[in-house]
Image (cartoon, rainbow, N blue to C red):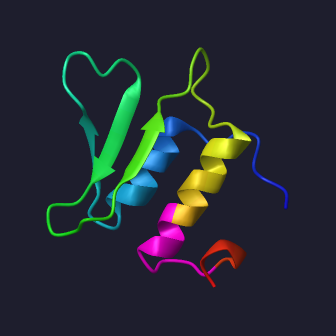
Amino acid sequence: MKFPKDFTWEELKRLVGKYGYHQNNKGKTSGSRVKFEKDDSDICLDLHKPHPKNILKPYQILDVLEFLGRIGVIRNERNK
């Protein structure tokens, strides 16, 4: 499976925002750990914000795809 090499954190925020999820930093001690949550859902996406660049790494894109499958947006091999 090929992944985009230029998918940014801002694009991720816009994508999950379309499904009602918002970014929640887990407090002042969270560092770069961020959770995307939706008020009426128990499903969340928990990632480290990429650095030093703003581009998601392949393992993060896999996590995003799995998350999108869990919320029913896409169907992929991992959630059959």
Left or right position of 1 against 43: right
Image x and y of residue 58, in percent = 72, 43
Left or right position of 70 against 52: left
In front here: 78 or 75?
78
Residue sitting farthest toward the right? 1
The residue drawn where x is 71% and y is 77% is 77
In terms of image quadrants, where is residue 35? top left
Residue sitting farthest toward the left? 39
Residue 71 within the magenta-colored segment of the rendering: yes
Q: Which range is magenta? A: 67-75
Image x and y of residue 51, in percent = 57, 19
The residue drawn where x is 50% and y is 68% is 68
In front here: 48 or 23?
48
The residue drawn where x is 32% and y is 64% is 43
Left or right position of 35 against 9: left
Left or right position of 31 against 42: right
| Looking at the image, residue 4 lies above or below residue 50 | below
Image x and y of residue 8, in percent = 57, 38
The residue drawn where x is 24% and y is 31% is 26
Image x and y of residue 9, in percent = 50, 37
In front here: 22 or 69?
69
Check the picture and name the quadrant holding the C terminus: bottom right
Residue 40 within the magenta-colored segment of the rendering: no
In terms of image quadrants, where is residue 40? bottom left
Check the picture and name the quadrant holding the N terminus: bottom right
